[in-house]
Amino acid sequence: MTPGTYLAARRTAHRFTAEQLAEQLECLPHLGLTDRTGWLLAIEADLMPARETTIVAISEHIRLDIDLLQALDKARSDDGVKVPVHCHRCGVTPRQLRGSTAWPSATLCPSCSP
Ligand SMILES: [Zn+2]
């Protein structure tokens, strides 16, 4: 995963469309919904980095693992970065699923495992 695909996976796991999430986010300069949706999709496509304030705003609506997000960002330029365990489909981390059962797969959480 990249930072952008992680954000997209978490948004999808929370059943938000890009437009629905963009409706919840303020941005400066103020943009209309279509432009805001395009801005969000550009972040998810890794065409532009998300600012810290954007990540904070997104995390008010979607549960993110900031340590994972930072590791994914560092891993883009450093193959030696250890990326925390996470579901390769929905992006959830074991830490976010406290108290749940063991993961049946190394790359998929219990919810995403077949
Ligand atoms: Zn999952």
Image: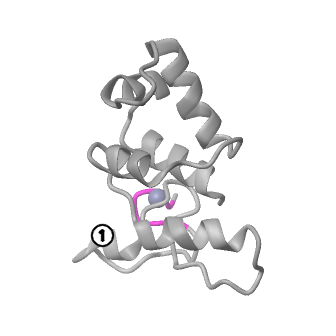
Whole-percent x and y of residue 45? 68, 41
Q: Residue furthest left?
A: 99
Left or right: 88 with respect to 29?
right
Question: Is residue 42 a member of the stretch shown in magenta?
Answer: no
Q: Is residue 93 left or right of residue 98?
A: right
Give the class, few, some or many, for how many residues have Cα within 10 Å of label 1's Cα (few <14, many ≥20). Answer: few
Which residue type does callout 1 highlight?
Leu
Which secondary structure dominates the residues rendered in magenta?
loop
The boundaries of the magenta stretch are 108-113
Instruction: Name the colouring of the figure.
Output: one colour
Q: Residue 2: image x %, image y %?
A: 66, 58
Q: Quadrant of residue 63?
A: bottom left
Dividing the picture into quarters, in which one does residue 44 lie? top right
Q: Residue at x 38, y 75 (%)?
A: 94
110 magenta-colored: yes
SS state under label 1 = helix
* Residue at 42% in and 51% down: 55
As drawn, 39 above or below 72:
above
The residue where tag 1 is placed is 97
